[in-house]
Image (cartoon, helix red, strand yellow):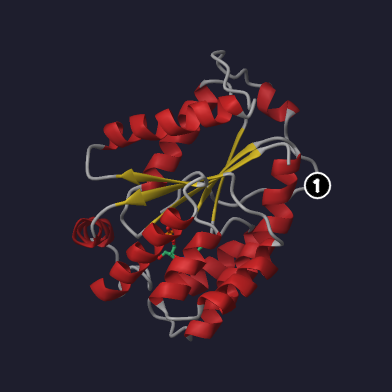
Amino acid sequence: MAGTFITFEGIDGSGKSTQLRLLANFLRSEGGEVLVTREPGGTSVGLRLRAALLDALEQVDPLTELLVFAADRAQHVRRVLRPALEAGQTVLSDRYADATKAYQGAGRGFSAELVSEIVQLATEGLTPDLTLLFDLSVTESSARTRRRSEGKQTGDRLDSEDAGFHTRVREAYLSLAAREPERFRVVTTNGSVDETHERVKKIVVPFLEARGQIVSREPATAGSRDTHRVPQRESPAGLEEPP
Ligand code: TMP
């Protein structure tokens, strides 16, 4: 496919969403044509599914959870990701299929075979070109999510799972990364936001240059993004400011 698909993964509170925003801003300032999206919630129907999935007051059965994440992904792949990649864009997605393997597989205990089948169905085989795994201890990441949810009436349903759940998810991510070293890069996020951003740039910029994606030194002009806009694709919804 003409574009480049980069996914951002990690346990809750690992800092991936902040890093995604910083990288998107940087690539755009370099003239790159970047689409920022996320799962769940990268489409308008996906936003509704996201609200239901993450509502701490909902009692979502684990099988329902697995299938709804897959439904969100099917819509996202068909309506947003494939059209953008076919149009040559650099797509940065805040989570994708590895999250289902880590959260519903290791976290909830569904078998790797079942999760892989469902992932295959939803993605139709669309695999990221590069996956950045943001890694932090469960103690530190939980402290961050606690700080983030202070003042909110309810936290996200999955954020509030116990440390054992988040430990299984973290270990699953690390073993996915070890199994596919070509695709994954593990980025430790215990330093400052700026230090992590520098590390991310050192990985992504050469990667995009090697693929011939535009990472020019020229700032983007106001009209240049419009000329690349993809026709007939659903606009990703509410994506520039992940919570
Ligand atoms: P976010 O807070 O990073 O946007 O992610 C929302 C939550 O959804 C997070 O706790 C991880 C979870 N999740 C899954 O459990 N399975 C999935 O397939 C995806 C995409 C997210």
Q: Position of residue 145 (x, y in %)?
A: 27, 59
Q: Is residue 151 visible?
A: no
| Relative horizontal placement of residue 47, taking residue 157 as reference (left or right) | right
Which residue shows up at 73% across the image and 30% down it? 228
| Relative horizontal placement of residue 119, taking residue 107 as reference (left or right) | right
Q: Is ligand 1 less than 8 Å from the beta carbon at label 1?
A: no
Decide: is 157 above or below 9. below
Q: Position of residue 58 (x, y in %)?
A: 44, 82
Decide: is 20 above or below 146. above
Which residue shows up at 72% across the image and 49% down it? 82
Which residue shows up at 31% across the image and 74% down it? 165
Q: Position of residue 36 (x, y in %)?
A: 55, 43
What is the quadrant of residue 149 in the picture? bottom left
Amino acid, disc 1: Gln
Labels in figure, total: 1
Query: Mark 1: which secondary structure?
Result: loop
Q: Quadrant of the N terminus?
A: top right
Query: Alpha-carbon neighbours of circle 1 within 10 Å: few (<14), some, or many (≥20)?
Result: few
Which residue shows up at 44% across the image and 39% down it? 21
Q: Position of residue 210 (x, y in %)?
A: 59, 26
Ligand 1, seen in the image, is in the quarter at: bottom left
Which residue reaches farthest right?
232
Q: Is residue 117 visible?
A: yes
| Relative horizontal placement of residue 134, taking residue 208 as reference (left or right) | left
Q: Which residue is mark 1?
A: 232
Decide: is 176 above or below 58. above
Decide: is 179 above or below 192. below
Q: Quadrant of the C terminus?
A: bottom left
What is the quadrant of residue 188 in the picture? top left
